[in-house]
Amino acid sequence: QVQLQQSGPGLVKPSQTLSLTCVISGDSVSTNSVAWNWIRQSPSRGLEWLGRTYYRSKWYNEYAVSVKSRITINPDTSKNQFSLQLNSVTPEDTAVYYCVRAKDGYCLNWGQGTLVTVSS
Amino acid sequence: QSVLTQPPSVSGAPGQRVTISCTGSSSNIGAGYDVHWYQQLPGTAPKLLIYTYNNRPSGVPDRFSGSKSGTSASLAIAGLQAEDEADYYCQSYDSSLSGWVFGGGTKLTVL
């Protein structure tokens, strides 16, 4: 059974960097048939896909246009995890952030969610 | 404003059948991209309900079904039960945005 365990700070100051980590159990971050995603949810923006990383003989990253200039998603094969970094945050980035394992374009497994508040 | 449009709320009595629509455009559902549905109970992460139009993961009752026509998709729930009260979201891929898009969510109330 695949489980995703998220960690990271719940409070980030404006203009700083939001960093979250998702530890994978029951699967490998290097599995060829799945993709590892970050999705956030807020009352104002609903569910919003942020980006993904996946391995198909080499590593690929894809990011949503809305955050493309500010986001980095990295796999860490040594720790079987992947991470999210979102730079230059504003209060609009306040949301519950989820790490998600996906296959064939749909979300199979979700992390527990992390409420990140952007405030000074 | 979400790329996929869902009604904010629907309701029905126990035992009844309700449908939730998900309207897209020619760059997502109308382009033939798959539609998936999720159920979210309060305080929890969304859970996969229907994938690729009308496939159910193990453990999802066959009271839930999906369909698609043109630029829209629908989720039908038959034999409503109190435990079905939740938020429901549709999801697809959009070629103009080169990424996944979600509906704004529909709150189902079981009367």
Image (spheres, grey):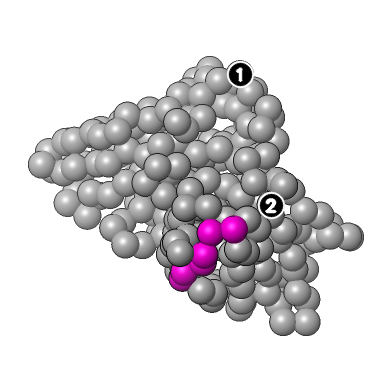
Q: Nearer the viewer, residue A4 or B2?
A: B2
Residue that protrudes farthest toward the right in the picture: A57
Q: Residue at x 47, y 53 (%)?
A: A91
- Per the image, label 2 sits on a secondary structure element best described as loop
* Circle 1 SS class: loop
Q: Which mark is residue A83?
A: none
Outermost residue to the bottom: A78
Judging by the rendered image, the residue that carries numbered circle 2 is: A70
Q: Chain of mark 2?
A: A
Residue A47 sits above or below residue B29 on the image: below
Residue B15 against residue B74 in the figure, above or below: below
Q: Which residue occupies 47% across, 33% down?
A: B2
Q: A79 or B50: nearer the eye?
A: A79
Question: Looking at the picture, which amino acid does disc 2 mark?
Answer: Arg
Residue B66: image x %, image y %?
Answer: 43, 35
Q: Residue drawn at (31%, 62%), measured in percent from left and top?
A: B43
Which quadrant would residue A80 be assigned to in this image?
bottom right
What percent of the width, then of the height, locates residue B26?
61, 18
Separation of marks 1 and 2 at Cα, in angstroms: 29 Å
Mark sitting on residue B26? 1
Callout 1 amino acid: Ser
Depth check, mark 1 against mark 2: the one in front is 2
For label 2, the crowd category at 10 Å Cα-Cα, with few meaning under 14, some 14 to 19 and many 20 or more, is some
Q: Are marks 1 and 2 on the same chain?
A: no
**What residue range appears in magenta?**
A10-15
The C terminus of chain B, quarter of image: top left
Query: Is residue A9 shown above or below B51?
Result: below
In the visual, does B64 lie left or right of A15? Answer: left
Task: Examine the structure image and report whether residue A100 is included in the region drawn in magenta.
Answer: no
Verify whether residue A13 appears in magenta. yes
